[in-house]
Amino acid sequence: MNLTKEQALQKIKELQEYIENSEKVSIGNINYPKACEILGNSLFRSDHFICEYQWYEHQLATIIRAINYLDNNNKEWIPEFSNSEYKHKNWFVKSGGSWAFNCCSVDDGYSCAPAWLHFKNKASAEKATKNKTIFDLYCKILG
């Protein structure tokens, strides 16, 4: 592939921006405000929702969408269940009165979990459970 000098400089600039953004955002430090920033969404407050449960779901869904966005080269990714592309979701078990991460399972067709709970990449799904903000949201939703 032959690039002009301007095209090569543009590609270098894009790569530098990508590296800078990749270093700033990791699954370990992503939270709701950062996810909104990544997606270009407005921040909502808890009083925008009828109940706390909806507020927790909204935050978790936004964070998962942002992680999938980053995993999909800064393009929105929506799980499509009419194809055989793998979609990953986290499972939790009740352990001693609290929730614990059990495993990351794969769906490639039918799923009993809502689409917004699915991750594009298994590694991202597993890393998400180590993020305290994300784990706490899962626990609040699970009850």
Image (cartoon, rainbow, N blue to C red):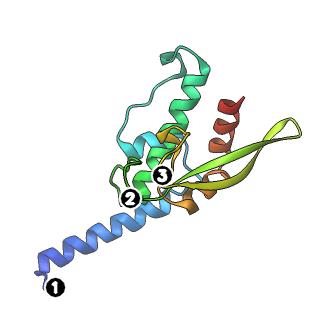
Give the residue type that dot 1 points to.
Met
Residue 78: % across, % down: 38, 47
Q: Amino acid at mark 2?
A: Asn
Q: Residue furthest bottom?
A: 2
State how far apart marks 3 and 2 are (Cα): 9 Å
**Mark 1–mark 3 distance (CA, rounded to whole Å):** 31 Å
Residue 97: mark: none
**Which label's residue is closer to the chain start, 1 or 3?**
1
Identify the residue at image location x=63%, y=55%.
104
Q: Give the CA distance from mark 2 to mark 1.
A: 24 Å
Q: Is residue 97 among the parts visible in the rendering?
A: yes
- Left or right of residue 132: residue 87: left
- Picture layout, residue 12 above or below residue 56: below
Q: Where the N terminus falls, by quadrant?
A: bottom left
Q: Name the spot of residue 84 as percent of width and height, x first.
A: 42, 58
Q: In the image, which disc is placed on residue 67?
A: 3
Give the image quarter of residue 60: top right
Kindly check if marks 1 and 3 are in contact, taking CB atoms under 8 A apart as contact: no
Which residue is the site of mark 2? Answer: 72
Q: Mark 1 highlights which residue?
A: 1
Element on which disc 3 rests: helix
Q: In the rendering, at what x and y percent does residue 126 appear? A: 63, 57
Which tag, 2 or 1, sits closer to the chain's start? Answer: 1
Name the amino acid, label 3: Ile
> Residue 142 at what x, y percent from top left?
69, 32
- From the viewer's perspective, is 46 left or right of 135? left
- At x 58% / y 16%, what residue is drawn? 51
Question: Residue at the spot x=48%, y=55% of the render?
Answer: 108
In the structure shown, which secondary structural element does the residue marked by tag 2 occupy?
loop
